[in-house]
Image (cartoon, rainbow, N blue to C red):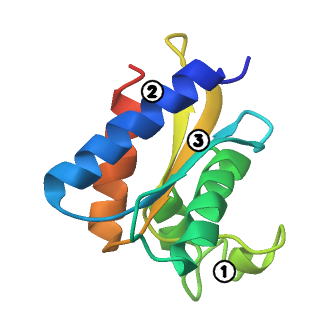
Amino acid sequence: MSITLEQAEKAVQAAKAKATEIGTLMNIAVVDSGANLTAFVRMDGAWLGSLDISQKKARTARYFDMPTGEIGKLSQPGGPLYNIEHSNGGLITFPGGIPIKNNSGEIIGAIGVSGSTVDNDHTVAQAGVDALS
């Protein structure tokens, strides 16, 4: 099972609306269950450097089926996943990437958001996830 384009676009639109509501500009990426880019938007004026970060956050969340902020906690020096960010061509291990589940609890993809503080990134990503529940 994988996220559909319609679902991915719905998540992007909800995330974009939340970014507008909180007054920030974001790059928003949604990947399918195979971590393939399904939908992407760069809001006018969003940082170019965050384009890649948003996509890597989405892929990281899908690769490990957990929010990127949780992976970050586990990847600190002395942690069980220390240095994991160097695997898979580079991972992002700070908040802003969240797995997306269907109504049966199966992971069908993930969303990654970048362009502001990590708290804002996570808030905007969560809005995208919530739009599909």
The secondary element bearing badge 2 is classed as: helix
Q: How many marks?
A: 3
Q: Is residue 60 left or right of residue 26?
A: right
Gap in angstroms between the C-alphas marked 3 and 1: 23 Å
Q: Is residue 22 left or right of residue 79?
A: left
Disc 2 crowd rating (10 Å Cα; few below 14, some 14-19, many 20+) is: some
Residue in the foreground of this view, choosing between 42 and 12: 42
- The residue wearing badge 3 is 110
- The residue wearing badge 2 is 10
Q: Residue at x 35, y 70 (%)?
A: 118
Q: Amino acid at mark 3?
A: Ala
Quarter holding the C terminus is: top left
Circles 3 and 1 in contact, beta carbons < 8 Å: no
Camera-side mark, 3 or 1? 3
Give residue 132's quadrant in the image.
top left
Q: Residue at x 34, y 30 (%)?
A: 130
Residue farthest to the bottom, as pictured? 77
Gap in angstroms between the C-alphas marked 2 and 1: 35 Å
Q: Amino acid at mark 2?
A: Lys
Residue 131, numbered label: none
Q: Is residue 114 visible?
A: yes
- The residue wearing badge 1 is 82
Image location (x, y in percent) of residue 107:
62, 28
Choose the circle earlier in sequence order: 3 or 2.
2
Q: Amino acid at mark 1?
A: Tyr
